[in-house]
Image (spheres, helix red, strand yellow):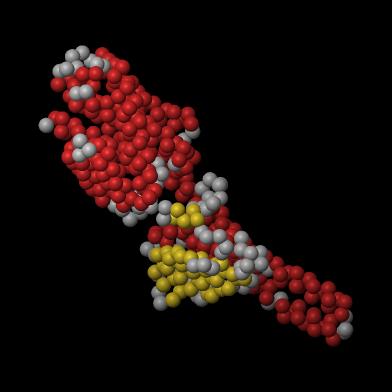
Amino acid sequence: MEIYLSEVVYTFLYVILCKMFVESFARKKGELLSWTMWTFLVVLTIFDYLVSIFFTKYFFMKQMIIILLGTTVMWRCYQLRFLKSSLIILFYQGLCFVTDYIAWMGLQKLLTITLVETTMLKLLMGTLSQLLVFSVIIILRHHFVQEAAESLTSLEWAKFSVFPIFTMLAIIAMLINFDGLNNTRQINTLICLAFGMLILNIFVFYLLWDAIQREVKIRKEQLSIERAKSQTVMYRQISENFDQQKKREHEYKNEMMIISSLLNQNEMEKLHIMLNKYNDEIAHRIDAIDTNHVIINAILNTKHQEAREKGIVFVLKVNDLSGLNMEDQDIVVILSNMLNNAIEACERCTGKKVIRVKTIKENGTIIFSVINTFEKIPHYVDGKYRTTKKEPFHGMGIENVKDIVSKYGGTCAIRYDKEQFYFVVYLTE
């Protein structure tokens, strides 16, 4: 009974390490609940254990079935294509074989062949192998998971790796100095200690990893908030300029009288100078896009001006948004990111450069819609649109918009065809 229980625990640890290995290359599917994930892992453990029992004499068939089961579960749980999932599981299985061989050869140097061939000591060898796999996973996380690489230095990663190395050395030291290894109770005790130390390694790993992810998330949120604050201040200043522009409209009457007087007196040179001056002023003033909302006006007028300077056609449809109940910073995050992405995409176009913007309130629903032409197909990886830029924390715009929209109970619709990219936000009043 003890042997069977130990084998089940060993198989479960094999599955957990497989999960950790896959997480080094892929993200969990967003809609998958935690309890669903653990249900899949428990089911995979049961099937792997049964396969290892019933196909003991058929080594290659056993390995093929285990790889197929692992591929199916990880494909279902993570944002992976089936082929990529199978390659990752195949790589993991190969890693397990290599570490098994290293652990086996190491134990042969320390113990007699007779003892190594006993079932319990095979489990001990397997535990050492799993600790080696765990160490490799830490190295993979360091090199392949960008968020963690940004948060920890190489020295901190080295400190992070000390615990599993110490555990392996402790197990080897116990093997060397453990008297009477033919005693079943002592072997069982040693196996329990080995399992416990491996489980503790995994627990500490996830504890630290969650702390790292929280830190990265906080840094992103702080950066996003600071950007939104600075943009909000900028747009408020622009809105003040817009108000000043409105005031200047009252001066146009007097200016028109002067122009009429110069025309009547046939002062064409002075009239020409005056008209050129007004044309220059008008060209640099913000267009009067008015939605009855200060921040939205500032954003639309600013982006309209920017698009026009870059030779982009800016088509706009607006109505009265005076009753919009949203924080200014949230409006800035949504509209600025949508319009910045559209302008950047149009800049890269060699053909038509068109942005169609709709900010309206219709039947109790606020609609922010941006449709733009593009040339290069958007970079879509693991269920998210990714930037190809290398700057840290760049390319978080769409995800930030989704977070804000979710905060207000709204929805986002994103798609693209051969010519245009569509980004629409729906918010209920």
* Residue 92 appearing in the image: yes
| 311 over 221 or under it: above or below | below
Residue visible at 18% across and 14% down in the picture: 180
Number of numbered discs overlaid on the protein picture: 0
Q: Residue 19, percent across and down? A: 32, 42
Q: Residue 248's quadrant in the figure? A: bottom right
| 215 over 363 or under it: above or below | above
Q: Is residue 40 left or right of residue 406?
A: left
Q: For the N terminus, which image quadrant?
A: top left
Q: Is residue 412 left or right of residue 55?
A: right
Q: Residue 339, percent across and down? A: 55, 63
Give the camera-side residue of 206 and 375. Answer: 375
* Residue 173 appearing in the image: no
Residue visible at 42% across and 64% down in the picture: 412
Q: Is residue 329 left or right of residue 84?
A: right
Q: Residue 327, percent across and down? A: 46, 61
Q: Residue 274, percent across and down? A: 81, 74
Q: Residue 125's quadrant in the figure? A: top left
Residue visible at 49% across and 53% down in the picture: 386
**Residue that extends furthest to the bottom in the rendered view of this protein:** 264
Q: For the C terminus, which image quadrant?
A: bottom left
Residue visible at 27% across and 39% down in the picture: 60
Give the camera-side residue of 63 and 168. Answer: 63
